[in-house]
């Protein structure tokens, strides 16, 4: 199936690792130019090199996205190189554990900059080009906005903001023909997730406990499965889909957990 993405210039923030990396690779497989935006140039280049070695097209822009000026400069650099932007995937972020009991104002605000402020800034700075191209925006969000998790107030608030911005932008940008959707991640196997679970006393048992509660196939979602949905939502094949918050999670959030072991 032709997804009509050939030669489209698509920004993927946090594109060097995990879901972002899988997404950048998925876009390149469809003939798009994946623009990997992330903190470390060396990490970005590894992904770009892999994509190019596989015959795809990719470039990188190093940017500390918690810095508003860096967001603006990243978008300017992309426009200077390509003269257009066809899509934006807001993905970068970190579940940094800034809670209510043990957090503080400074850390809370810093976490919002890491996790939701740059979503707004990247969309704001890219918007003139997206209007020209009638492009699309996909926001990656987390189940924490809907289910809570404990000890992660800032991250949960940021993801609630990501969901709200998805609906707000879908309304605001109707007049420009720009579609905006979100993909919600629950239990997805990424390098960051693997690192986290290894910090637990009995990592194997904890992983078994988590996967047993995922109704569909009792397994983790893969980064590729998230990426496939992102690519579809960015593509012309989803031409009448906007303002949607789509869960790619094996039913983790919405299905009865009692079904998991049925």
Image: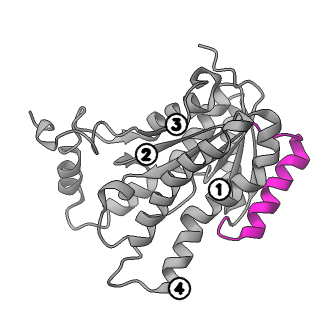
In this rendering, which labeled residue sits more in front, label 3 or label 2?
2
Question: For the N terminus, which image quadrant?
Answer: top right
Q: Earlier in the sequence, mark 4 or mark 3?
A: 4
Q: CA distance from mark 3 to mark 2?
A: 11 Å
Residues shaded magenta: 65-86
Secondary structure under badge 4? helix
> Residue at position x 39%, y 58% from top?
145
215 lies above or below 73: above
Q: Which residue is mark 3?
A: 227
Residue 109: where, in percent of width, then height? Answer: 54, 78
Residue 74 shown in magenta: yes
In this rendering, which labeled residue sits more in front, label 3 or label 1?
3
> Residue at position x 75%, y 33% from top?
134
In this rendering, which labeled residue sits more in front, label 1 or label 2?
2
97 lies above or below 35: below
In this rendering, which labeled residue sits more in front, label 4 or label 3?
4
Q: Which residue is mark 4?
A: 106
Q: Residues within 10 Å of mark 3 (few under 14, many from 20)?
A: many
Q: Quadrant of residue 100?
A: bottom left
200 lies above or below 51: below
Residue 110 shown in magenta: no
Tag 3 near tag 1, CB within 8 Å: no
Q: Quadrant of residue 213?
A: top left
Residue 93: where, in percent of width, then height? Answer: 53, 60
Q: Residues within 10 Å of mark 2 (few under 14, many from 20)?
A: many
Residue 47: where, in percent of width, then height? Answer: 65, 45
Q: Which residue is mark 2?
A: 184
């Amino acid at each position: 199936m032709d997804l009509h993405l050939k030669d489209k210039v698509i920004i993927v923030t946090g594109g060097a690792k995990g879901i972002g990396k899988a997404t950048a690779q998925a876009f390149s497989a469809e003939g798009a130019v994946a623009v990997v935006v992330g903190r470390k140039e060396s990490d970005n280049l590894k992904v770009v090199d892999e994509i190019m070695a596989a015959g795809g097209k990719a470039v990188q822009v190093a940017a500390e996205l918690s810095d508003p000026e860096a967001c603006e400069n990243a978008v300017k650099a992309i426009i200077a190189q390509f003269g257009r932007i066809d899509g934006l995937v807001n993905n970068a972020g970190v579940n940094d554990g800034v809670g209510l009991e043990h957090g503080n104002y400074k850390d809370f605000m810093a976490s919002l900059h890491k996790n939701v402020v740059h979503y707004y800034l990247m969309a704001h700075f890219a918007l003139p080009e997206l209007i020209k191209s009638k492009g699309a925006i996909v926001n990656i969000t987390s189940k924490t906005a809907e289910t809570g998790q404990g000890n992660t107030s800032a991250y949960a608030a940021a993801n609630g903001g990501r969901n709200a911005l998805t609906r707000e932008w879908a309304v605001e940008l109707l007049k420009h023909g720009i579609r905006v959707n979100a993909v919600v991640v629950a239990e997805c196997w990424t390098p960051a997730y693997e690192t986290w679970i290894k910090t637990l006393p009995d990592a194997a048992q904890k992983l078994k406990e988590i996967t047993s509660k995922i109704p569909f196939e009792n397994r983790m979602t893969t980064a590729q499965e998230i990426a496939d949905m992102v690519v579809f939502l960015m593509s012309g094949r989803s031409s009448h889909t906007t303002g949607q918050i789509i869960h790619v999670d094996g039913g983790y959030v919405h299905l009865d957990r009692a079904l998991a072991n049925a």
